[in-house]
Image (cartoon, rainbow, N blue to C red):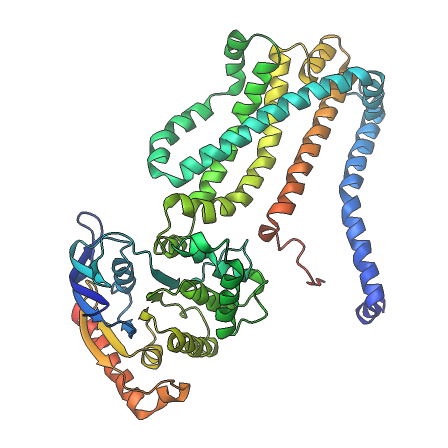
Amino acid sequence: MNFVELDRVSLRYGEDGTLALQGATLGVAAGEFVAVVGPSGCGKSTLMRVVTGLWPPTAGTIIVSGRKVAGPLSIVGMAFQNPTLLPWRKTLDNVMLPLEIVKPHCERLRSQRAAYVAKARDLLALVGLKGFEDRFPWELSGGMQQRASLCRALIHDPSLLMLDEPFAALDMFTREELWLALQDVWLARRPTVILVTHDLREAVFLADRVLVMSARPGRIIAERTIALERPRRLDMTYEPYSVAIIHELREYISTARSSNM
Amino acid sequence: MEARDAIDNPKLRRRSRLRRKAARRALPWIVIIAIFVMWEIVVRAFDIEQFVLPAPTAIFAAGWEWRADMLDNAWQTFMTTAIGFLFAVIFGLVGGVLFGSSTLVYEGLYPALVGFNSIPKVAVIPILVIWFGIGTVPAIVTAFLISFFPILVNVAAGIATVEPELKDVLRALGAKQWQIVQKVGLPRSMPYFFASLKVAITFAFVGSIVAETVAANKGIGNLMLVASSRFEVPLAFAGLLMTSIMGIGMYLVAEFIERRTIGWATRGVDAVGAPRG
């Protein structure tokens, strides 16, 4: 039984608006790292919101952790292209925001604050933000803000981590640094991850399996397992094995785009 | 040469920075004094009659002569305005939270509120007099009515414009609507709130003084009415001046609280360690 199971899920905006997803079927095993790639506007972000129950699907069923999704799940960590840190909170307090909301942490936070602070500090150190805990978000660079945003998505040990192009706004070197940071965190904690991206190298470097979506209305048209050992190194993405996969994925996407035009 | 010294020598650099800061502090005072001096010169040069435009010296003299009445009436106006303003802050905040966090409330009540706000408040004062009689209450109510709308609109805007991604992050954690308002919406709307306070406080003074001129037997507005009916124009101007001073005072209080509570929003103004020029 997969941890996340989508069965012919469709989503239409409004009564007779655009069809964003059509018959999307996919399964993600517990602890698996899956990347979703596709032409722009193919409904990748819609897929994320449907999986987490933020938007109810028009048709089809979604099962997460053995249960049918009916409303917003309360166990998901999310990070977006925009770090959306709160400017009035220091980095540490930003990271600890989910603990103030998620049960059972919110009830324990007051009595076990020291333990939670230590946990947040450890997490920040893991992504290379040691020493920046008491800085405000606007005192951090874009890459550092995104690291903090990742920590915020992970602090409550979510069993499902949804990442919507979290590195898209960063320059390539920062992006690569963050790939490594994310890999470290994932290896240390092993949450189930669904990463939406348009960067094929990123998908190949990070994911166990890459899913390709068609142009809108989106559905899964291909998938590719990445059999590189962990922990992966950046140069692995330039090896013939990876390059071949990247080319293959690119082919899928360009046919998906042209078939729709 | 001096510029290079300033770069090389931290002590000199600090001193020049302090000097700049002192100049910035003094600037508004210099402007105010300059306005009064110009005014005085114009009045004297063109020999303008005192009941048309009194000279600043005449205004100050009149204010000083009637200082006991001035202070007494100013205190009345100040209290009236402060009470009305306090209600405006409370209702503006609560209303703003409701309007900003509930689309139902927004869509249902907003048109009615805009319609209500379009009514000139001066026109309402006679009705208030019928309800509450001549005195302090109509002035308080007018100050409240005229100043709560900008507060409400701004707080509502701050809450309603929370980034959808951030909402998703919180909702995916199981946050309820009120938690999103509490953790994000309210703190986020604070800069809007303080911006509106600065507008609203001046509005509140307008409201209370207009009400005092129409329907009161005390307050700066009343004092100005009485003074001008007796052709003591310098005294009427002194009342205006007093009102400005109170307005500036309240504005500064709002700004002080703003700096203390939401320094994160005005960080650009005095960024730490960012030498410029």
Q: x and y percent of residue B83 in the render? A: 60, 24
Q: x and y percent of residue A203 in the render? A: 32, 77
Between B153 and A148, the residue placed more toward the observer is A148
Q: Residue at x 29, y 90 (%)?
A: A241
- A225 sits to left or right of B68: left
- B141 sits to left or right of B28: left
- A70 sits to left or right of A162: left
For the N terminus of chain B, the quadrant is bottom right
Between B42 and B129, the residue placed more toward the observer is B129
Q: Residue at x 81, y 67 (%)?
A: B10
Instruction: For residue B189, say whether it is visible.
Output: yes
**Vertical position of residue B180 compared to residue B32: above or below:** below
Q: x and y percent of residue B3 in the render? A: 81, 67
Between A176 and A257, the residue placed more toward the observer is A176
Residue farthest to the bottom?
A240
**Vertical position of residue A139 compared to residue B105: above or below:** below
Q: Residue at x 71, y 23 (%)?
A: B240
In which quarter of the view is residue A213 placed?
bottom left
Figure label count:
0
Between B233 and B267, the residue placed more toward the observer is B267
Instruction: For residue B147, say whether it is visible.
Output: no
In which quarter of the view is residue B253 placed?
top right
Q: Residue at x 63, y 21 (%)?
A: B80
**Vertical position of residue B264 compared to residue B247: above or below:** below
